[in-house]
Image (tube, rainbow, N blue to C red):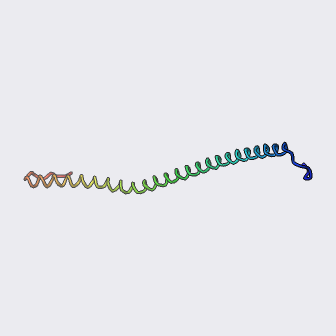
Amino acid sequence: MPNNEPVTKQDLLDLQASTKQDLLAFAERLLASQTEMELRITENLTEKMRATQTEVIRAFGNWARPVDIKLRRLSEFDERIGLLEERMGAIERGDPPIKSH
């Protein structure tokens, strides 16, 4: 429409309808972009959380192995102490000592 012609009511209605369509299309694109961004953020955070969980599990496993070894050795000591207590009890009662093979 040339600049020197007066604007009609229909021109304004057409401009309003066109602007409304443009705004609706923009809002749809914005919403789609926001949804896509939220999905990417969620996937990224999920991946990082899984990686963190894996690191924690590995660190705990590395800590637990030596503790497990120490605990197993303690049970060996408990067993040996038990045998010594049995022998001491036998000596205290006057039983003949048990010979080990």
Q: Write down the quadrant of residue 81 in the picture.
A: bottom left
Residue with the most extreme left position: 94
Residue name at image x 92 percent, y 52 percent: 4
Q: Is residue 2 left or right of residue 61?
A: right
Q: Nearer the viewer, residue 76 or 67?
A: 67
Q: Nearer the viewer, residue 75 or 98?
A: 75
Q: Position of residue 68 (x, y in %)?
A: 35, 53
Q: Is residue 86 left or right of residue 54?
A: left
Residue name at image x 52 percent, y 51 percent: 49
Q: Is residue 76 left or right of residue 86?
A: right
Residue name at image x 40 percent, y 57 percent: 63
Residue name at image x 14 percent, y 55 percent: 88
Q: Is residue 75 left or right of residue 2?
A: left
Q: Position of residue 11 (x, y in %)?
A: 85, 45
Q: How many marks?
A: 0
Q: Position of residue 71 (x, y in %)?
A: 32, 54
